[in-house]
Image: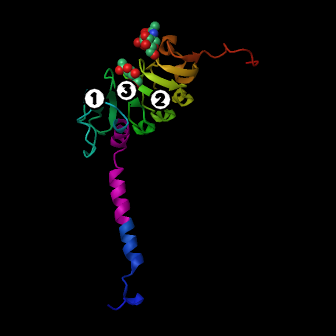
Amino acid sequence: MAATPIGTLPPLSAATTILVVVASFLASMEAMNPDVEALMALRNGLQDPNGELNSWDPDLVDACTWSRVVCDDLTRRVIRLELQMNNFHGAIPEEFGDLKNLISLDLFKNNISGPIPASLGKLKSLVFLRLDHNRLTGPVPNELLALDKLADANFSNNKLCGIIPTSGSFENMSPSIFANNSCLKWPGRMSGNGR
Ligand SMILES: *[C@@H]1O[C@H](CO)[C@@H](O)[C@H](O)[C@H]1NC(C)=O
Ligand SMILES: *[C@@H]1O[C@H](CO)[C@@H](O)[C@H](O)[C@H]1NC(C)=O
Ligand SMILES: *[C@@H]1O[C@H](CO)[C@@H](O)[C@H](O)[C@H]1NC(C)=O
């Protein structure tokens, strides 16, 4: 068999360019719905002993028919997540910050662990954030102070630690929303640094 002379090879660079264009087009189609990606990030890290999330099918174009998910009729973006009281085990994924239209996030009374992601500070429409009765650790991130619409939040009965936020969106909230955590402290009660 004669070796193929170099000069008769197809123009590789053109073929490569087409492949790259096709691949990035496919990748962008997959990335089209950030809500689906965020919810699948939760789903993949979660134990769901009661099979509550079996309807969460990542091949659908949006998440609007999934159980415990409510979308806006017009935008088809997720506006409410009703994940309370299901003994879910796992962590809140960083990707939840991409649920840009979310108004209500309810994780009340599960077995959610790990930190509250700072990325939740990107949820500028959030009004309702119920995280109480879980096993969350770490601080209440400062990023949440900038959630201008937040009206009803609850972090009680977790294992949170750090300084309790009292300004920004938390200025007028009841102290009860931080009750019964491992080591949350009110500001100014620590020994004097001249503050
Ligand atoms: C929560 O998870 C921990 C650790 O996996 C487990 O020991 C505990 O029993 C769970 N609590 C409930 C109510 O299922
Ligand atoms: C405090 O929270 C723990 C879970 O972190 C819970 O088991 C306990 O019952 C709570 N105590 C009160 C007084 O609510
Ligand atoms: C926060 O949750 C705790 C425990 O469920 C409850 O006792 C408290 O009243 C709640 N606070 C607010 C302001 O809803």
- Report how far apart the C-alphas of labels 1 and 3 lie in the structure: 12 Å
Q: Nearer the viewer, residue 80 or 1?
A: 1
Q: Is residue 156 left or right of residue 30?
A: right
What residue is disc 3 on?
Answer: 104
| Total numbered labels placed on residues in the image | 3
Residue 26 part of the magenta-drawn span: yes
- Secondary structure of the residue carrying tag 2 is strand
> Which comes before the other along the chain, label 1 or label 3?
1
Q: Position of residue 65 (x, y in %)?
A: 23, 36
Write down the region rendered in magenta. Answer: 21-42
- Mark 1: secondary structure: loop
Q: Earlier in the sequence, mark 2 or mark 3?
A: 3
Q: Is residue 163 left or right of residue 23?
A: right
Mark 1 touches mark 2? (CB < 8 Å): no
Horizontal and vertical percent for residue 174? Answer: 50, 12
> Does the residue at mark 1 contact the one at mark 3 (Cβ under 8 Å)?
no
Instruction: Identify whether 24 is placed above or below 113.
Output: below
Disc number lying in front (1 or 3): 1
Q: Quadrant of residue 145?
A: top right
Q: Main secondary structure of the magenta part?
A: helix
Q: Which residue is mark 2?
A: 114
**Cα–Cα gap, marks 2 and 3:** 20 Å
Image position of 119 (left or right of 48): right
Q: Which residue is mark 1?
A: 68
Please report the residue visible at 42 percent of the width from the left and 21 percent of the height from the top: 134
